[in-house]
Amino acid sequence: MPVVRSCLLFSICFFIFACGSSSTTSTSSTTTSTASAWDVVTSSGTVIDGTDFIGTDQSGLIATGGVTQGSSSGDFDIAIVDSDTTNGWAVGSLGEVLKSTDSGTTSTRLDFSTLSASRLRAVAPVTTTHVWIGGQDSVNLGASIWVTTTGGTSWSSQFNTVTAFPNRSLTTLDRVNSLFFFDENTGYAAGGYSGNVSFILKTTNSGSTWTTVYDTQTTGTNDEINRIFFADTSNGYAVGNRAAILETTDGGTTWTNISSTFTCPNSDPDSCDLHEVSCSDVNTCYIGGEGGLIAKTTDAAATWTVLTTGTTEDISALDVRSEKIWAGGFNGTILYSENSGTTWTAQTSNTTYIVQKIEMVSDLVGYAACGNTATNTGAILKTTTGGK
């Protein structure tokens, strides 16, 4: 069964939180510096928020081999088709949609202009032709989901919060931040608006209908969701601002706020936004966020252990391959652990951009998406040595 994560700010194979818990213990991890093989394969005038395999700039050209093939500005999400790693997709905050069929060597800029899309933040390809995109409608500012079943030749709108919830307030900055699909039928979308209100949607019929399974406007809690991830078809997590952690054990039908299981180390939820969550199995998960915080659970989020990473830079990216973990963050931070987070090594990224997303294709080959929102510039990094 193909499991499709979306990229943007957030989604992959393990679980990271940047805060502590009421049941949180602190462990001593060490961080040492070493030269690494993370090389800039493209540098462009674009903020790249995520990558699962390939990188592209907003002008619609994917760069490889250290050659810049265009520039622009905006946030990005990039994803790969799990069943065919030569096929990749990228989306940008100005509404661009790009597609590559040759592992990122070249790309095609697809026509998405007629759908009033902006702030595209998430892309989830299930097959080479069936792809979902999430972001914001540029006209009514509602969080929106679009789909293609023709490999990008044609698109249709499946959901918009403004039309779905006509009485909803605070639609400014309403957006879909994360997508997660198990197959062509079952998928999830998560996001929020105005930075402090969140929602989770679920479909079981390829998006013909989307059901709201969590909405803070009706539950009374808040905090925008940044990432959604499922360890298996039943157990999933969503994380967001102010140390928000949600859990489902019934395949996303119902969600429980379990933020109380985790206490921010600085005891200040306002500076404890969580950007990433990923699990290696149903019991072992990691979360990452502000202040260099990475936390781990081995009992399905009942308790959390804060790992000492040796950095105070915000953690915005995580990728796990069994006991091997890569973490990325502000100011070009890339950390590596080969013992499930007990110790960490700082890898040289050759950039000062925010490392927004890391995706390892194997233990040796991986990609990192980086950007600077202040200058609207970014880069794609690649390693063929595991960053060592």
Image: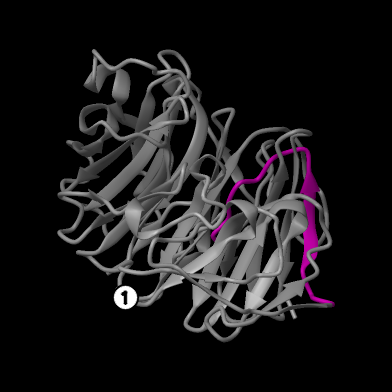
Q: Residue at x 44, y 67 (%)?
A: 24
From the viewer's side, name the closer residue of 122 and 16. 16
From the viewer's side, name the closer residue of 350 and 42. 350
Where residue 206 appears, x then y in whole percent? 22, 46
Q: Residue at x 77, y 69 (%)?
A: 38
Quadrant of the image occupied by residue 364: bottom right
From the viewer's side, name the closer residue of 45 and 336. 336
Q: Residues within 10 Å of mark 1 (few under 14, many from 20)?
A: few
Where residue 383 appears, x then y in whole percent? 72, 72
Q: Residue at x 45, y 48 (%)?
A: 243
Image position of 374 with respect to 84: above or below:
above
Residue at which label 1 appears = 299
Describe residue 232's horizontal placement relative to residue 172 as left or right.
left
- Asked whether residue 322 appears in the rendered view, the answer is yes
- Asked whether residue 149 appears in the rendered view, the answer is no
Q: Is residue 46 magenta?
A: yes
From the viewer's side, name the closer residue of 176 and 336. 336
Which is the main secondary structure of the residues drawn in magenta?
Answer: loop
Q: Kindly state the secondary structure of the residue where label 1 is placed.
A: loop
Q: Quadrant of the C terminus?
A: bottom right
Image position of 28 with respect to 1: above or below:
below
Please state which amino acid type lies under the numbered disc 1. Answer: Asp
Where residue 82 appears, x then y in whole percent? 42, 66
Quadrant of the image occupied by residue 327: bottom right
Image position of 201 with respect to 125: above or below:
above
What's the magenta region? 35-52
